[in-house]
Image: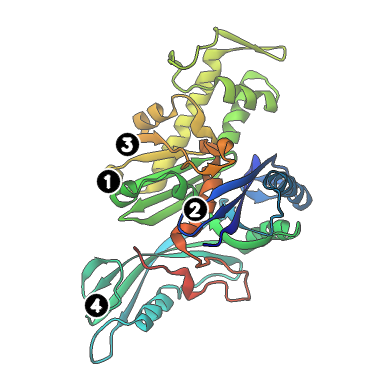
């Protein structure tokens, strides 16, 4: 079987990661090249300087191309930002033909109904993901085609984004000569890389704590039912360290990564630092550093719980909370997360892929890996199209396996 070249570009607030791979049929992608560059021109997932952002993306792409030994022509793109909104919508149709059998055309009709929501001119549809079908009150139907009934319902999770933000980001990428395969909400991509099928079925929340945003996606009955983006993440932790301890921001970021521990107790795999830490002529208290990080992480975890807007979230999420993203590397964050949320908490490591992939086995690269895996779960159906060219097609919908 012929191998297909695929690529992903994760444009984050602190780094741009480009991954090039090939895939053979239903096999997992094999990594050919990885390029990582520091992000310039982005803030909280939004482009604030077009030329700087474009150059950061170009640097990442060129590094990946050098590793892979071939040119990157098109890629799956991750998107996030506070401008993202989502809603669950329901569509209903009647089966009017005499045999009362659901045909593919009926499926198409109900999809058209559920997508018929009013989207302001300044917004774009990113995803319309069916959660499940109901026939004459029988819920939990995965594929209604061929079944008998008088009424067909579908519930879908619909995600929209600010058109200007999407067009600016895609303009940066097209400006360096890379075509766009699809635009994917980043927590959906991260979920592809770190969640287990059992967790998706039972009920789980994934929180990707990046540099500028914390991206949330909740799954129940093997489908996404809630997504949200918080403009609070690793940057705010580093900023608090910088202000609280009087350090340059870059040094605060480095100390967070090297010594950060939200539960400063001895760890088997790591010798705890002395009472004071000296770096680049700055002397700080390890206890003060840990306390600043703990307070900010506690606040973030409480914000995550508030986003759920459900008093019974403990029952809805028996598989708990999966933390991923760069800030999930903070020692003790899973233990603190469990204490604050009262949920089972684990760190989400992206699935291991073959090839030049050593650097990707880290929560910081969950989105990058997930963007590659998105195609496998969703087939060739594209979620996004530029405005004016039929940017939402019936192919957005997929039947659950």
Residue 352 vertical placement versus 155 (above, below):
above
In space, the residues marked 3 and 2 are separated at their CA atoms by 27 Å
Residue 373 vertical placement versus 106 (above, below):
above
Q: Which mark is residue 312?
A: 1
Residue 185 coordinates in the image, percent (x, y): 52, 55
Q: Residue 263 carries which label?
A: none
Dot 1, how many residues are within 10 Å of its Cα: few (below 14), some (14-19), or many (20+)?
few
Asked whether 45 or 66 is in front, the reply is 66
- Assign a secondary structure to mark 3: loop
Q: Is residue 78 left or right of residue 224?
A: right
In space, the residues marked 4 and 2 are separated at their CA atoms by 31 Å
Instruction: Give the label, 1 or 3, closer to the camera.
Output: 3
Instruction: Give the label, 4 or 3, closer to the camera.
Output: 4
Residue furthest out toward the top: 275
Q: Who comes first in sequence, dot 1 or dot 2?
A: 1
Q: Who comes first in sequence, dot 4 or dot 1?
A: 4
Residue furthest out toward the front: 1
Q: In this view, does 215 lie to the left or right of 56?
A: left
Report the residue marked by disc 4: 147
Which image quarter: residue 116? bottom left
Residue 289 vertical placement versus 355 (above, below):
above
Q: Which residue is located at x 72 percent, y 12 percent?
A: 281
Q: Who comes first in sequence, dot 1 or dot 3?
A: 1
Report the residue marked by disc 3: 343
Residue 223 vertical placement versus 205 (above, below):
below
Instruction: Give the label, 1 or 2, closer to the camera.
Output: 2
Residue 186 in sight here? no
Which image quarter: residue 238? top right
Report the residue marked by disc 2: 373
In space, the residues marked 1 and 3 are separated at their CA atoms by 12 Å
- Asked whether disc 4 touches disc 3, contact meaning CB atoms under 8 Å apart, the reply is no
In space, the residues marked 4 and 1 are separated at their CA atoms by 34 Å
């Amino acid at each position: 079987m012929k191998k297909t070249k695929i690529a992903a570009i994760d444009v984050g607030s602190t780094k741009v990661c480009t991954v090039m791979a090939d895939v053979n049929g239903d096999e997992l992608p094999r990594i050919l090249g990885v390029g990582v560059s520091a992000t310039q021109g982005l803030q909280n997932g939004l482009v604030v300087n077009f030329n700087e952002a474009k150059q950061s993306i170009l640097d990442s792409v060129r590094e990946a191309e050098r590793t892979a030994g071939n040119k990157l022509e098109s890629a799956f793109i991750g998107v996030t930002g506070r401008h993202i909104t989502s809603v669950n919508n329901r569509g209903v149709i009647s089966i009017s033909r005499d045999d009362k059998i659901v045909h593919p055309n009926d499926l198409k009709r109900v999809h058209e109904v559920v997508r018929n929501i009013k989207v302001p001119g300044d917004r774009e549809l990113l995803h319309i993901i069916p959660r499940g079908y109901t026939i004459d009150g029988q819920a939990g139907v995965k594929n209604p085609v061929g079944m008998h009934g008088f009424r067909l319902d579908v519930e879908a999770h619909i995600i929209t984004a600010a058109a200007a933000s999407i067009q600016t980001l895609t303009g940066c990428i097209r400006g360096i000569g890379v075509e766009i395969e699809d635009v994917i909400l980043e927590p959906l991509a991260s979920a592809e890389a770190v969640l287990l099928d059992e967790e998706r079925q039972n009920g789980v929340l994934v929180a990707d704590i990046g540099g500028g945003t914390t991206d949330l996606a909740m799954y129940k009955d093997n489908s996404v039912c809630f997504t949200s983006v918080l403009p609070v993440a690793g940057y705010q932790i580093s900023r608090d360290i910088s202000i609280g301890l009087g350090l340059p921001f870059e040094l605060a970021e480095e100390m967070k990564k090297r010594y950060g521990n939200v539960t400063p107790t001895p760890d088997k795999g790591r010798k705890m630092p002395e009472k004071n830490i000296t770096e680049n002529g700055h002397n700080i208290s390890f206890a003060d550093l840990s306390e600043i990080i703990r307070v900010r992480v506690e606040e973030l975890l409480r914000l995550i719980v508030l986003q759920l807007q459900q008093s019974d979230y403990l029952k809805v999420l028996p598989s708990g909370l999966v933390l991923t993203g760069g800030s999930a590397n903070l020692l003790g964050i899973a233990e603190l997360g469990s204490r604050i949320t009262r949920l089972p908490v684990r760190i989400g490591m992206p699935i291991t892929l073959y090839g030049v992939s050593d650097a990707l086995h880290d929560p910081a690269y969950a989105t990058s890996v997930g963007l590659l895996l998105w195609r496998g779960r969703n087939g060739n159906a594209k979620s996004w199209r530029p405005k004016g060219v039929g940017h939402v097609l019936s192919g957005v919908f997929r039947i659950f396996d």
